[in-house]
Amino acid sequence: MNRYRDLFAHTATAAAVLMLATAVPAGAQAQVNSKWITIVTSAEPPNLDGCMSTNTFQSLVIKHNVVETLIEKNATDGVLRPRLATSWERVDDSNWRFKLRQGVTFHDGTPFNAQTLKRSLDRTMSRDIVCGDRTKFFNDLLIEVTPVNEYEINIKTARPESILAMRLATTAIVGPNTPMDKLTAAGVGVVGTGPYVFDSWQTGQQIALKRNEKYWGAKPPVEGVRYLVRRCAPPWSRSARRIWRMPSPSRTRTSRPTSVI
């Protein structure tokens, strides 16, 4: 039986700043000044729902910035480390116990505890919505979440599951006021517990996050981030040919690609 404990209960790293400054996907560029980071991206996420937090552009904006996971997988060594859970243990083949971090609140002021965590995990596992994180990392695995006390939960799996902790390292925790029966719409922010708070979304133009001044962990040095949407012209368009100085096609052109980011 392995047990993991939080060795740094009062000093969470500013992982969000590293993500904002360095984890920029292909097609995006980052510009940093002393107070704000500006990231120029070639696409806009369809929504900012926590249930889609591992999709490329949703992840860029919200994962570990606005929403957090119970457990964090270190990108360098693959070691699982505490985040919203301070420790966890596998009790038997089907049951796991998680102790939760105290003193954490969602951005809307709601306390993070066993009840609000249960609601978030129940939403992720619900078949009422198409949750990308569930289908990608849980597939047909069913779980039952039971609060033990205010800051401890038991998760029972429908079959023996030795890597449940790894699966939960991908699962974003959202506020209890998030609708249970539908994904959040474009232009609407997500409520989490992370070091940055959703600020605004001008559809087709930019998304802005600002620092969470009540964050439970270390205060991020960066005040906020802007994601500017600058879609690239398709390569067959006239504007693209002018920019790239492509000659006007005088011979037969191949068919257009089916999709272009």
Image: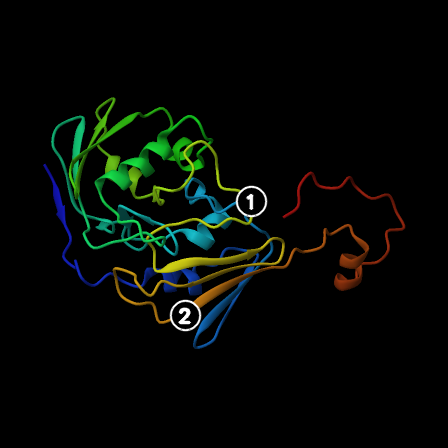
Dot 1: element:
loop
Please tell me how crowded label 2 is: few (under 14), some (14-19), or many (20+) other residues with Cα within 10 Å.
some
Image coordinates of residue 76 in percent, x first then y, are 30, 55
Image coordinates of residue 207 in percent, x first then y, are 53, 58
Is residue 102 visible in this depiction of the protein? Answer: yes
| Of residues 50 and 213, the one drawn nearer to the viewer in this rendering | 213
Is residue 138 visible in this depiction of the protein? Answer: no
Q: Amino acid at mark 1?
A: Pro
The quadrant the N terminus occupies is top left
Above or below: residue 19 compared with residue 119: below
Q: Are marks 2 and 1 in contact (CB under 8 Å)?
A: no
Q: Which mark is drawn over residue 261?
A: none
Q: Which mark is drawn over residue 46?
A: 1
Q: On the rendered structure, is 168 left or right of 34?
A: left
View extreme (left): residue: 1
Please tell me how crowded label 1 is: few (under 14), some (14-19), or many (20+) other residues with Cα within 10 Å.
some
Q: Residue at x 34, y 60 (%)?
A: 195
| Of residues 36 and 74, the one drawn nearer to the viewer in this rendering | 36
Asked which quadrant contains residue 7, the reply is bottom left
Image coordinates of residue 107 in percent, x first then y, are 35, 54
Q: Which mark is drawn over residue 223?
A: 2
Q: Amino acid at mark 2?
A: Glu
